Amino acid sequence: MHDHAHAHDPSRDHDLDDATYDLLVVGSANADLVVGVERRPAPGETVLGSDLVTHPGGKGANQSVAAARLGARTALLARVGDDAHGRLLLDSQRAAGADTVGVLVGGAPTGVALITVDPSGDNSIVVSPGANARLTPEDIRAAGSLLAASRVVSTQLEIPVESVTEVVRTLPATARFVLNPSPPAPLPDEVLAACDPLVVNEHEARYILGDDAAPGDSPEDWARALLTLGPRSVVITLGARGALTADGSGSPVTVPSPKVDAVDTTGAGDAFTAALAWRLGLGEELPTAAAYAARVGATSVTRQGAQESYPTADEVAGQMEGQVEGA
Ligand code: RIB
């Protein structure tokens, strides 16, 4: 069994029982403007794509919807504009059952993500942060009661790093902090040290380690090297190959992903991180929570869009039964 520092602290258990939210997501909310393309244009080139579709998205809003659809008591702390995109995002949170008490409105237009999806389901994304860039450290401090009411607090990097740092500083000792550093940016040591886990894909792992930092070139090597930077645990998502977990208590553990036909990978990492954070908050060990999260992420890539693609807990359970039957 993994020896996790949070596992058997009775005072912590009491606090967890008192928590209002299983998961508070602090992060971005974007309108995703999505066009399907046969291939992406080269510089200076124009290509024709499919009809434009507008979906609710953003890494923070996606995580919040993913957790709420799974049944987690979830809240979102974010900022949107006082505009149609902002209303789309609020409606989507409420439809999933997430609490929007922490969603601030105004200050700039809602963030927008310009997304192309190719025939293999892979995406390319350019984000205009808009209101996300105006979610300030002051906003985080003002939401202290929301943080205090949460078992797990999860963030990403489509909001200012200073605001993520303020989350770490405002976090009660009883809460667990999860960070997906996407898109990657330099991280203060105090943020890295608070991560439990730091959730990265291969690109983000390489960014954080830098060209010279990785002693080897396998995910196991990256995980060990990332742990030396301070996080209490690390999860590296490996797409169809599943995920690798490490907390320094033994060798890294790889968990598989179900084999699925990918239609659209947009937001799959957000669903994975949300499910992982929720299950860790329920007390699951890291590999167990990551295995569940991998099933959630795999289900999401079989459907179009980000939030629309997220499964309920029953759908995840059904997928597991299907696997056993098909084995
Ligand atoms: O992770 C997927 C998300 O990244 C999209 O929903 C888009 O908004 C960008 O933030």
Image (cartoon, grey):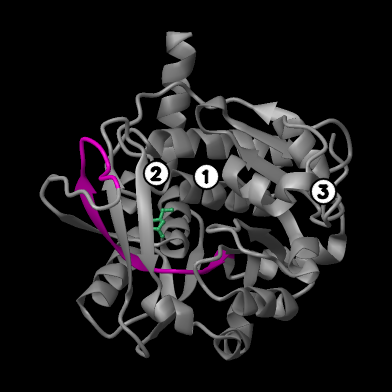
Q: Residue furthest top?
A: 327
Label 1, label 3: how far apart the Cα atoms are? 20 Å
Q: Amino acid at mark 3?
A: Leu
- Is residue 33 found inside the magenta-colored segment of the image? yes
Name the residue tied to disc 2.
Answer: 312
Name the residue tied to disc 3.
Answer: 227
Give SS at disc 3.
helix
Label 3, residues with CA under 10 Å away: few <14, some 14-19, many ≥20: some
Label 1, label 2: how far apart the Cα atoms are? 13 Å
Quarter assignment of residue 160: bottom right
Closest to the observer, 83 or 9: 83
Label 2, residues with CA under 10 Å away: few <14, some 14-19, many ≥20: some
Q: Amino acid at mark 2?
A: Thr
Quarter assignment of residue 42: top left
Residues under numbered marks 1 and 3 in contact, where contact means CB atoms less than 8 Å apart = no
In primary-sequence order, the first of circles 1 and 3 is 3
> Which residues are drawn in magenta?
22-42
In primary-sequence order, the first of circles 1 and 2 is 1
State left or right for residue 82 relative to residue 298. left
Q: Amino acid at mark 1?
A: Phe
Label 1, residues with CA under 10 Å away: few <14, some 14-19, many ≥20: many
The quadrant where ligand 1 appears is: bottom left
Give SS at disc 2.
loop
- Is residue 35 found inside the magenta-colored segment of the image? yes
Depicted 189 relative to depicted 117: above or below: below
Percent coordinates x, y for residue 109 in the rendering = 30, 81
Mark 1 or 2, which is nearer the eye?
1
State left or right for residue 73 relative to residue 125. right
Q: Is mark 1 within 8 Å of ligand 1?
A: no
Label 3, label 2: how far apart the Cα atoms are? 32 Å
Question: Residue drawn 72% across and 38% down?
Answer: 245
